[in-house]
Image: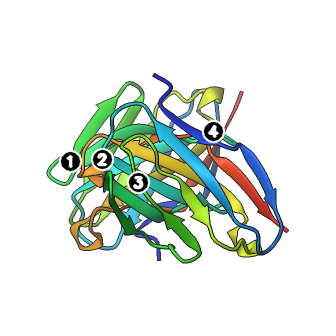
Amino acid sequence: SQQGEEDPQALSIQEGENATMNCSYKTSINNLQWYRQNSGRGLVHLILIRSNEREKHSGRLRVTLDTSKKSSSLLITASRAADTASYFCATAYAPAGNMLTFGGGTRLMVKP
Amino acid sequence: NAGVTQTPKFQVLKTGQSMTLQCAQDMNHEYMSWYRQDPGMGLRLIHYSVGAGITDQGEVPNGYNVSRSTTEDFPLRLLSAAPSQTSVYFCASSYSIFGSQETQYFGPGTRLLVL
């Protein structure tokens, strides 16, 4: 079973609005990563947040991590049509060895 | 740098055929991995490697073999293709032997259809 699960599975918003995606996971982790995938393409790394960090920013992206709730959120502010993509969280945790496991993703559509 | 390259981009196989999906990286990365992505789903790890001569199984290794004879190349072999192996296959690499803890660099993927 997948370690991380994203919520919602799909999200549709207007350009300029903020988009929030959530990721829940099952066991303790070393870090959590967020990736974007445009249709038919490979994944692109967005942000990595370590288990001892609570918040991280990169441009219009803000990621939070709550290890007590085993959850993370990705906020995209002032969304653009070009943000339309699928977003995945991925977790690495010691019991799984040197493996990174991905959630099922959130499909974001930003309407112009 | 070309980054992570994969060939072929698309392949059609008949059930029972074998083939090798190629993956190469020119970033001198130690950690390389293979994932499959089924429609509307996330990625599932097939095999990974932390360096030349070292490979290990991921979540879904059955039906696949890998080898790592050089740092640059990490081919994935389908021994006897089955329709259940119809998927998009992604290769990824990261810098060190602790690759799961680091940014992954993905190839463009290989779409495989098994009839």
Q: Are marks 2 and 4 in contact (CB under 8 Å)?
A: no
Which residue carries the number 2 mark?
A64
- Which chain letter matches label 2? A
- Which chain letter matches label 3? B
Which residue carries the number 4 mark?
A38
In front of the other: A51 or B79: B79
In front of the other: A112 or B49: B49
Which residue carries the number 3 mark?
B68
Q: Residue at x 72, y 51 (%)?
A: B111
In the image, residue A52 lies at what x, y percent? Answer: 14, 51
Sooner in the amino-acid sequence: mark 1 or mark 2: 1
**For this view, does B65 lie left or right of residue A101?**
right
Q: Residue at x 33, y 39 (%)?
A: B29
Query: Is residue A53 shown above or below B14?
Result: above
Q: Are marks 1 and 2 in contact (CB under 8 Å)?
A: yes
Question: Cα distance, mark 1 to mark 3?
Answer: 37 Å
Q: Is residue A73 visible?
A: yes
Badge 1 and badge 3 in a common chain: no
* Within-10-Å neighbours for mark 3: few <14, some 14–19, many 20+: some
Which residue carries the number 1 mark?
A54
In the image, residue A10 lies at what x, y percent? Answer: 63, 54
Question: Cα distance, mark 1 to mark 2?
Answer: 6 Å
SS for callout 3: loop
Sooner in the amino-acid sequence: mark 4 or mark 1: 4
Q: Is residue B39 visible?
A: no
* Within-10-Å neighbours for mark 4: few <14, some 14–19, many 20+: some
Question: Cα distance, mark 2 to mark 4?
Answer: 23 Å
